[in-house]
Image (cartoon, rainbow, N blue to C red):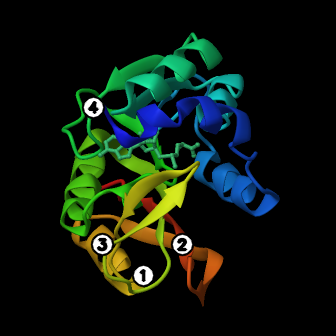
């Protein structure tokens, strides 16, 4: 059983909608993508709100997650998408025009983040854009509780994440601190929009 299997029922009810600042990043990420383009939602959770938004905008959505219960919810929310059970850093079987990994990579040990960046780079078509969030400050690995359950978090410092993304072959288009590190539980959250160069 994966950690999110235990809270899928709560998550589906309490996952907040994307904020305006987040939606602006999604709009930039998807700008110019043709209808029907294959888009990857890595760490898709219950499919709401992200896969649902992509499906409504006419993209061909593939969602990947390792949680059976989260994927069960996603299948109900967006029946027309392609749902796969796999680890975030598993090799991708098909090319994608764009990929998102929203609020998921920080559940992996930091040594695996570079693997995710490399695999997403390999799975993207030239010119494809990758949007993701990660931790927003330098921290040792830690756990925190959500819905009464303990979850593991890890991420390198923001500058190190950007260096890893570039080392994988991406050009960083923008990085934004969505939540500032204020101390205690508030360790910050950074969004990064990166692009696989067209040539
Ligand atoms: C905080 S939720 C975010 C879900 C969705 N992206 C969203 O924004 O609502 C994190 C998701 O990442 C998935 N996840 C965490 N670690 C994973 C791993 N190693 N491989 C695949 N999925 C993982 C969890 O099962 C969960 O569905």
Residue 117 sits above or below residue 68 on the image: below
- Which one is in front in this view, the residue at disc 4 or the one at disc 3? 4
Residue most toward the front? 148
Q: Which quadrant of the view contains residue 157?
A: bottom left
> Who's the residue at 24% across and 34% down the image?
92
Select label 3 or label 1 by which is in front.
1
Residue 104 horizontal side relative to residue 163, left or right: right
Say whether mark 4 is within 8 Å of ligand 1: yes
Q: Which residue is mark 4?
A: 86
In space, the residues marked 1 and 4 are separated at their CA atoms by 26 Å
Q: Are marks 4 and 2 in contact (CB under 8 Å)?
A: no
Q: CA distance from mark 3 to mark 2?
A: 16 Å
User: Where does label 1 land, which residue?
Assistant: 158
Which of disc 4 and disc 1 is earlier in sequence? 4
Q: Position of residue 127 (x, y in %)?
A: 41, 50
| Nearest the eye: 39 or 108 | 108
Q: Which comes sooner in the sequence, label 4 or label 3?
A: 4
Residue 180: quadrant of the picture: bottom right
Where is residue 150 drawn, in percent x and y? 43, 55
Front one among 171 and 116: 116
Q: Earlier in the sequence, mark 3 or mark 1?
A: 1
In contact (CB < 8 Å): disc 1 and disc 2: yes
**Left or right placement of residue 12 versus residue 41 in this view:** right
Residue tagged by mark 2?
190
Q: Which residue is mark 3?
A: 166
Query: Which mark is on residue 11?
Result: none
Whole-percent x, y for residue 198 in the image: 36, 53
- Does residue 171 lie above or below 129 as drawn? below
């Amino acid at each position: 059983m994966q950690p999110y299997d235990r809270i899928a029922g709560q998550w589906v009810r309490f996952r907040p909608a994307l904020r305006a600042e987040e939606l602006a990043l999604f709009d930039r990420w998807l700008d110019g993508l043709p209808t029907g383009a294959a888009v990857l939602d890595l760490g898709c959770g219950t499919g709401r709100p992200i896969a649902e938004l992509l499906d409504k905008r006419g993209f061909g959505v593939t969602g990947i997650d390792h949680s059976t219960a989260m994927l069960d919810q996603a299948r109900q929310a967006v029946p027309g998408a392609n749902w796969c059970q796999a680890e975030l850093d598993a090799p991708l079987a098909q090319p994608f025009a764009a990929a998102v990994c929203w609020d998921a990579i920080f559940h992996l040990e930091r040594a695996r983040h570079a693997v995710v960046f490399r695999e997403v780079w390999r799975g993207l078509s030239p010119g494809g854009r990758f949007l993701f969030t990660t931790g927003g400050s330098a921290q040792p690995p830690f756990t925190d509780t959500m819905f009464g359950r303990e979850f593991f978090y890890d991420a390198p410092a923001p500058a190190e994440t950007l260096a890893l993304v570039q080392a994988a072959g991406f050009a960083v288009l923008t990085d934004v601190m969505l939540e500032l590190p204020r101390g205690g539980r508030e360790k910050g959250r950074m969004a990064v929009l990166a692009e696989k160069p067209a040539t």
